[in-house]
Image (spheres, rainbow, N blue to C red):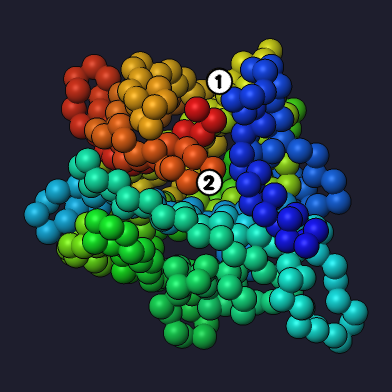
């Protein structure tokens, strides 16, 4: 029973803010406990070389990891629609290596990995959210949840992101199927989508090491921002054909944040010029106690340029209420190096993810700050509010 209690407790604290309503505002431990020391877990650093396809799979020797997909779509009527699918992994302990030549099947409750998945479909005032939990053992690649590289597959129960490439020597990450469905009292929601990569993977930061504070800790981080997405989405029991663009983030770490950091604001933008932009700020952890910022400017051909903290300016301009919280849904985002001065705004404020670990995640429109001309679209994620 102690093992069960430990699992349940970790599910509750997994990704929770270190500052609760009962805690004094000065007590922070990093959003979601992600500022904890790495301990015996592996630590991300800039000497690591990312290797594919191996790094598409899970990294159980790191404490935390995720596969994070967002998509800006249109239905057959030309109406915008957004979706999210995310698989999170958290290690309970450092995996033990089996003796040479042995790979025993772990007992059902001998889990050393916890999994959490979120899905959302959003259109107009409709915003549907679902959540699942699972456990697994790092030596078991056929459990209730997991992620393997060849052929690529990331799953929890019947929700899955999986390769549709069958050729043995081909890139099994280049063409994926995404399928997830959830019943609810509005008629159900979900999607069956085909994702085709029309550009290369992009490594963020220093060849894939993304620093997250002035103290130096961070994560291994890459993206596939060039997905062409086609398929069907069901919302409120109605299924429509959709098409558009997707962005997949892959990240793993054992100490993502500094202990004083309270959450983050993260943007991914598809610009009409064909360029892409990823930019974030972590509230706290910067030089002199300010916020820490980082980003990547990506050409239409997929060439990345890492943006230093002083090359990014982002400021909230207006807030709206979402689930009883005031969250900034209109921003000014300036990247002088890229010649960008943008207003980034959420057309719909009610995109609160009312999950075990609540946060805001929704579609945004990017416009020229001076002329108001629409320049692109994307997603905004905000945590710790």
What is the secondary structure assignment of the residue under circle 1?
Answer: helix
| Residue at point 43%, 18% (across, down) | 315
Q: Residue furthest right?
A: 99
- Residue 1: where, in percent of width, then height? 78, 62
Relative to 362, residue 163 above or below: below
- Which image quadrant for residue 182? bottom left
**Residue 194 showing in the rendered view:** yes
In this picture, residue 41 sits left or right of residue 322: right
In this picture, residue 333 sits left or right of residue 356: left
Q: CA distance from mark 1 to mark 2?
A: 35 Å
**Residue 210 showing in the rendered view:** no
In this picture, residue 276 sits left or right of residue 10: left
- Residue 22: where, in percent of width, then height? 64, 24
- Which image quadrant for residue 270? top left
For label 1, the residue is: 310
Relative to 3, residue 267 above or below: above
What is the secondary structure assignment of the residue under circle 2?
Answer: loop
Relative to 73, residue 382 above or below: above
Relative to 357, residue 257 above or below: above
Q: Nearer the viewer, residue 139 or 7?
A: 7
| Residue at point 44%, 21% (across, down) | 314
For label 2, the residue is: 356
């Amino acid at each position: 029973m102690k093992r069960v209690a430990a699992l349940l407790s970790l599910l509750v604290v997994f990704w929770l803010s270190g500052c609760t309503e009962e805690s004094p505002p000065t007590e922070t431990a990093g959003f979601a406990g992600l500022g904890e020391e790495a301990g015996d877990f592996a630590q991300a650093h800039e000497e690591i070389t990312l290797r594919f396809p191996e790094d598409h799979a899970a990294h159980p020797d790191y404490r935390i990891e995720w596969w994070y997909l967002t998509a800006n779509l249109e239905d057959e009527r030309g109406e915008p629609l957004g979706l999210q699918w995310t698989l999170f992994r958290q290690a309970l302990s450092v995996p033990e290596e089996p003796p040479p030549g042995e790979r025993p099947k772990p007992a059902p409750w001998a889990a050393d990995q916890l999994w959490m998945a979120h899905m959302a479909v959003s259109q107009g005032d409709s915003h549907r959210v679902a959540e699942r939990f699972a456990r697994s053992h790092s030596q078991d690649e056929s459990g209730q949840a997991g992620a393997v590289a060849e052929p690529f597959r990331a799953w929890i129960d019947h929700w899955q992101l999986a390769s549709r490439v069958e050729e043995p020597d081909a890139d099994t990450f280049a063409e994926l199927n995404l399928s997830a469905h959830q019943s609810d009292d509005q008629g159900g929601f979900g999607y069956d989508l085909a994702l085709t990569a029309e550009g290369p993977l992009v490594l963020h930061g220093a060849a894939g090491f993304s620093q997250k504070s002035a103290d130096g800790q961070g994560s291994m981080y890459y993206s596939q921002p060039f997905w062409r997405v086609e398929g069907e989405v069901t919302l409120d029991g109605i299924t429509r054909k959709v098409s558009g663009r997707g962005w997949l983030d892959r990240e793993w770490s054992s100490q993502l944040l500094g202990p004083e950091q309270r959450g983050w604001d993260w943007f991914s933008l598809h610009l009409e010029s064909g360029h892409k932009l990823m930019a974030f700020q972590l509230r706290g952890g910067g030089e002199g106690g300010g916020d820490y910022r980082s980003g990547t400017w990506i050409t239409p051909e997929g060439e990345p340029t890492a943006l230093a903290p002083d090359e990014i300016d982002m400021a909230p301009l207006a807030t709206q209420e979402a689930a009883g919280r005031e969250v900034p849904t209109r921003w000014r985002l300036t990247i002088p190096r890229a010649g960008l001065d943008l207003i980034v705004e959420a057309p719909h404020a009610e995109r609160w993810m009312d999950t075990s670990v609540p946060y805001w995640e929704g579609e945004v429109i990017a416009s020229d700050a001076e002329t108001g001309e629409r320049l692109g679209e994307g997603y905004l994620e905000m945590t710790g509010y």
